[in-house]
Image (cartoon, rainbow, N blue to C red):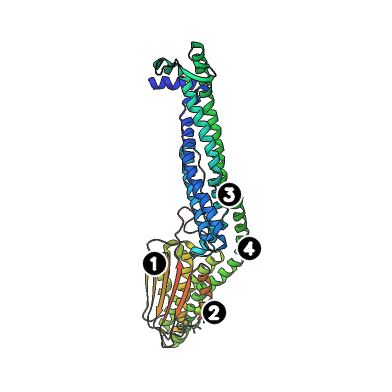
Amino acid sequence: MDTSTGGATRRRLPPALRAPFEARTWREFGHLMLGLPLSSLYFAFALTGLSLGAGLLVTFLGVPVLAAALAMCRGFGAVERGRARMLLGTEVADPEPVRAARGGALGWMVAMLKSGASWRHMLYSLVHFPWAVFTFTVSLVFVVYGWAALLYPLWFWVFPAFTDMPGLQLFQNGDHTFYLDSPLRIALTSVAGLLLVLVTPWLVRGFAAVDRGLIRGLLGPSRMAARVTELESDRGVVVDTAAADLRRIERDLHDGAQARLVALAMDLGLAKEKLAEDPQAAARMVDEAHGEVKIALQELRDLARGIHPAILTDRGLDAALSAIASRCPVPGGVAVSVDLPERPAEAIEGIAYFTVSELLANIGKHARARTAAVDVWRAADRLLIQVVDDGRGGAQAAPGSGLAGLAERIGAVDGVLIVDSPPAGGTRVTAELPWRVRPAGPGGPGGRR
Ligand SMILES: Nc1ncnc2c1ncn2[C@@H]1O[C@H](COP(=O)(O)OP(=O)(O)OP(=O)(O)O)[C@@H](O)[C@H]1O
Ligand SMILES: [Mg+2]
């Protein structure tokens, strides 16, 4: 009950009188107090790193030193963003990360030196220090003197004879010493203190607002840069998409539907041979061929709409690969083993599917194998596919052929295709794809690529 009355009273107070007691004021004041020690640290490290790095730049050593100094300033920035979140109630997003065009330490250093965000962090570490000295001093003086003067009557009353003096000695001019000891002077001191106490929150608020601006402007993501990269990549994507779509349809046709049609032609060829001697077997084969045609048609239809075969989209790699393996004309059958903790990203799954499809089509067409096996598994951040047969071997990727197309398709996602097919016999094709997880949410399976 007490608190509610207190709250109501406080709410009825005008903001000017309420401000000195508000938590926000004290949080912001805390922010300014903490700002000085932290900023001196940032300043010392940033200045040392910068001057050392710049001085050493004539030798190559300057580059790593500068890069390290910039990385350190980014760390300071993270602390400052956290501080702003907790004490100023301001959420500032992380700046764009440093993207190295090439791997390795050198690529990282170059990217760090080229990143505008890192230099903005360095600038913050340097310019925030003088500002922190100013705000720290001014706000501390205001708070201490304000409250001290406001409460002056109290401590004058408690300690009237603390020293031999009858009160605060304001100044001494020759023989004349001015004491705050008369009731009027005491009252005036207290009024002056009250004014200071009332002004301080607004001063603190103003300082905090500048701090917020500095943190947003120098430690957040640069809006222009973000927008420019976004637009650039949008334009690139538009230009690339048409060409890439054509390539993809060409590859999908080759590795998917065309492989189905090859199998179909083989089935029909066998059926033709059997027709005279064993019409029943021939009829069975024609029946199978009929099923094959339906699948090929469905695949063509899917392809034209730019989506993966339904069985892959709905049931994943295991089911889809088992289906194509069962249609592969190898006498001993094709063993399929898919060992994945979860489904990979759609694009990767599609490439894995079409890779196996083309490799099995090759086995059917060229290998004359007795058995074959398909293995798919995940190793760290790679998806590995291995298709093995015990056929005649000697597979070679000729330009424009299926294997070359596969290598290109896999290379486009930073994967590799290794064909090991000695003339003595046996073929082992290994494909390594990057493992990308499927983004969660409604856009998941079944969407367009
Ligand atoms: N598993 C295999 N066993 C034996 N030889 C193979 C095997 N796979 C491919 N080859 C040989 O390697 C060659 C190249 O294969 P590739 O898939 O690149 O072309 P293709 O199958 O002949 O044509 P496309 O795939 O364009 O229809 C084939 O012509 C074949 O001689
Ligand atoms: Mg081929």
Label 4 or label 1, whichever comes before in sequence order: 4
Q: Amino acid at mark 3?
A: Ser
- Residue placed under numbered mark 1 in the picture: 379
Label 1 or label 2, whichever comes before in sequence order: 1
Q: Amino acid at mark 1?
A: Ala
Label 2: which secondary element: loop
Label of residue 222 in the image: 3
Instruction: Work out how far the residue at label 3 is from the one at label 4, CA to CA, in angstroms.
Output: 26 Å
Label 3 or label 4, whichever comes before in sequence order: 3
Q: Are marks 3 and 4 in contact (CB under 8 Å)?
A: no
Local packing at callout 4 (Cα closer than 10 Å; few below 14, some 14-19, many 20+) is few
- Residue placed under numbered mark 4 in the picture: 239
Label of residue 114 in the image: none
Identity of the residue drawn at 36% across and 80% down: 332
Instruction: Work out how far the residue at label 3 is from the one at label 2, CA to CA, in angstroms.
Output: 47 Å
- Residue placed under numbered mark 2 in the picture: 401
- Foreground mark, 4 or 2, reads 4
Q: Nearer the viewer, residue 171 or 391?
A: 171
Q: Amino acid at mark 2?
A: Ser
Instruction: Work out how far the residue at label 1 is from the one at label 2, CA to CA, in angstroms.
Output: 29 Å
Q: Nearer the viewer, residue 354 or 217?
A: 217
Identity of the residue drawn at 52% across and 44% down: 92
